[in-house]
Amino acid sequence: MMLSKWSVSAQGNFNREGSLFVHRSFHIVYLDDHKLFSNGLFELCIKPFFPLANVTILANGDDAYAYIKSQIDGNNRIDLFITDINHPGLKGDVLIKMIRQYEKEKDCDFRIPIVVITMMVYAFVPELVAAGMDMVDCYFSKMAEAYEIVDGIEELLY
């Protein structure tokens, strides 16, 4: 489902028509150790469509887990967690399992939507794929088009 209608102008600017979330703030946590990709995702997929989003960008799985735990403990809602699978510290599959376990332990009334954006083929994360939507809400290849990622983010935030 495409919730916003957008295009790129001749000058290279994004034109947005009717995005549902332009005037709403979101708390997004993004984990990727590739600075170029994380900056690109932020500039192309988050900033233009979710300008009020509070985005925390991390490069280490250990730091991400500590941050997410602190947010859960402080009753601070995380609207979306976007992660790669390979990065320093806790690997993505282990990190995701630990987040889901911590949510259960704390009896959270809200489940953090998780998006995996990776160069890895699904076969490298069979436990996550087998668990399906119990673990991860959406998968994308780093080869995906920006509009595909924006549409996926909008679907999860809607």
Image: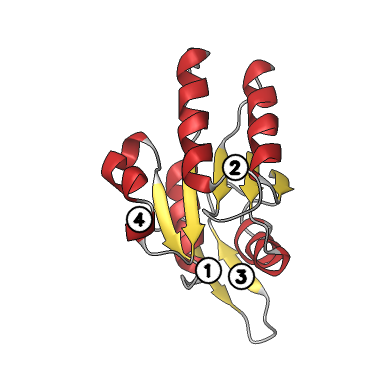
| Residue annotated with mark 1 | 146
State which mark lies toward you, 4 or 1.
1
Mark 4 and mark 1 in contact? Answer it, CB < 8 Å: no
Q: Amino acid at mark 3?
A: Asn
Q: Earlier in the sequence, mark 1 or mark 2?
A: 2
Mark 3 and mark 2 in contact? Answer it, CB < 8 Å: no
Q: Earlier in the sequence, mark 3 or mark 2?
A: 3
Seen in the picture, residue 74 relative to 43 is either above or below; the reply is above
Circle 4 crowding by C-alpha within 10 Å: few under 14, some 14–19, many from 20:
few
Distance from Cα at disc 3 to Cα at disc 2: 38 Å
Q: Is residue 4 visible?
A: no
Distance from Cα at disc 1 to Cα at disc 2: 27 Å
| Residue annotated with mark 4 | 1
Q: Earlier in the sequence, mark 3 or mark 1?
A: 3
Q: Secondary structure at mark 4?
A: loop
Mark 2 and mark 4 in contact? Answer it, CB < 8 Å: no
Residue 23, position as x, y percentages in the image: 65, 44
Foreground of the two, 64 or 139: 64
Q: Earlier in the sequence, mark 4 or mark 1?
A: 4
| Residue annotated with mark 2 | 90
Q: Secondary structure at mark 3?
A: strand
Q: Amino acid at mark 4?
A: Met
